[in-house]
Image (cartoon, rainbow, N blue to C red):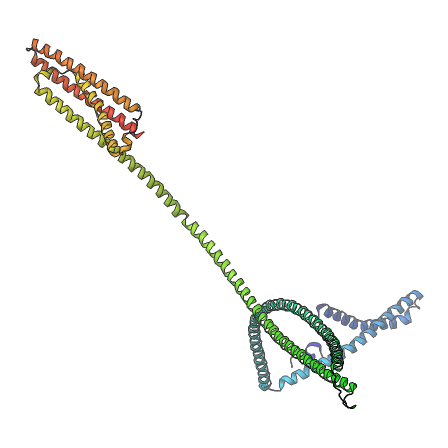
Amino acid sequence: MQRNSSKSLFGVPGSRGARASVSSLEGLRKVLRNEQQGDSIPQARASLQSQQREDAPDSPAPSTTDDMEHRQTLRGLNDRLAGYLDRVKLLREENQDLQKQIDEIEAKRKVPSGRDWDQTLESLEDLKKKIKDITMENVKILLQTDSSVLANEDFKKKLEAETKANKELDKDLEDLKRTLEETKLTQENLQQEMDLLKSELDQLTRDHQNVRLLFAESLSAHLRLNFSSFVLQEVEDLCEKIKNSKVTVEIESQTSNLADLVKNIRVHYEKVADNNMKEMDNWYKSKFDNIKVEDAQNLEALESGKSELKDLMKQKKILEIQIKTLLGTINSLEENIRRTKDECALRLQPTWAAIRDLQRQLTEVTQQIEQQAAQNRDLLGIKTKLEQEIQKYDDLMRGITADPESLEFSLDEALNCERSVLNEEPLRMEEQEVQQQAVSQPPAALQAPPEVKGEGALEAEEGAVNVKEAAASKSAKKKKIKKSKKSSKKSSSSSSSSSSSSSSSSSSSSSSDSEKEDEKTADVTAD
């Protein structure tokens, strides 16, 4: 039994069980329903015929209503039968076609036929060729894109170069336009000058012609006058000769013709006039030739001047361009200098601030040093004064200890003595200054009137008077002390001890007072 045959599935072709291929489940159901109906139709017919046969002799004729219903059912059944038969025909035809296709397929399957690799290889080769062609086209396209990119870059570079050249050409064209305008202006000026020169030349030619005509007219008139005067003179001379002559002269008629003589004279003067005219023409021609030569020279000089002017204008433009470039470079350099100055100033601001701080600190340090030096000088002066005072006190103490009568030297006397010494020092200083001034002054200055003393001098004089009074009181006290010492010699030891203690206390008090006064003087000098 063959696979997929119509006999196995649908029965023998042309039989009742033959059917068409069904694509869906509902179609299969409809086909089955139609088959069931088709199988029931002949059974119904047979049952109806048997019933009619059985009922025909026994039963009477049916009614009209039953006949109508029976007819309608028969008609419906006939219609269904006709449709079914038509459907069966169609299904048979379709089944035959399908059977033919199945037989063809099975026949092809039965024949052992291998695959045709040549066709596949040919198709593969064709595909490979197509792939190669496509790859080559892709490579060509890539090369074209690369070349187009390079060409685009070249075109961009060319465009930039052309734009630069175009700008330069525009600048050159502007320069040429300027030069053209300048040349036009110069040409117009030269044309005006040429027109003026031509007008002057025409005027000169007209003047020359007029002068020539006037000269010819004047020459002809002059010649006529000269000729007439000459003829008259000749006639007068001849008349005088005739009058004065007493000699009879025979004159031939042919030679003594006056008309011939006049004719000869006229011819002679005409020749002279022609010669003069020729000379004048030659002179004017030479003058005109000279003028033409000068004109040609002037034209050559004008052309050379034009060429020189063009060269100078070109040089001027070149120099202007150079000046512009130099001005641009100068401006750029000035801008760079300004920027560098600003940058240097910005960079040097902290250094300048540090320098100012250092200068301020230096000034402060110098002031401090000067103040310290002044203080040191003041202290040295005070030290020297103290040393001098100490030396004086030592001298006084030595004098007191050496003189037994001066053991009872009181504290008041020591203080007065100290004050007198202190007051004597400025007097000595003033005397030394006066002596130095007297030595340094010239002799004319010595005869000058004395200056008015200031407050310091008056104070010094008052101090000197006080010192003198203190010395007088001191001498009086010493006399009293001597008298008292003579009366009381027993109490010398106690008085000496008391005097020594008083002297020590007076020295200490005087030293403290001197220190205070020195401090006051130092403060005054500092102020």
Q: Is residue 197 visible?
A: yes
Residues 61 and 475: in front is 475
Residues 205 and 310: in front is 205
> Residue 269's image quarter?
bottom right
Residues 453 and 238: in front is 238
**Figure quadrant of the N terminus:** bottom right
Where does residue 131 sit, x and y in percent of width and height?
57, 79
Where does residue 383 sit, x and y in percent of width and height?
20, 30
Vertically, is 171 above or below 425?
A: below
Q: Is residue 212 left or right of residue 442?
A: right
Q: Is residue 367 left or right of residue 242?
A: left
Q: Residue at x 13, y 17 (%)?
A: 501
Q: Is residue 21 visible?
A: no
Q: Is residue 150 left or right of residue 214?
A: left
> Residue 214's image quarter?
bottom right
Q: Residue at x 39, y 46 (%)?
A: 352
Count up the numbered dots.
0
Where does residue 508 sit, x and y in percent of width and height?
17, 21
Point out the residue furthest to the left here: 490
Where does residue 18 sit, x and y in percent of width and height?
74, 77
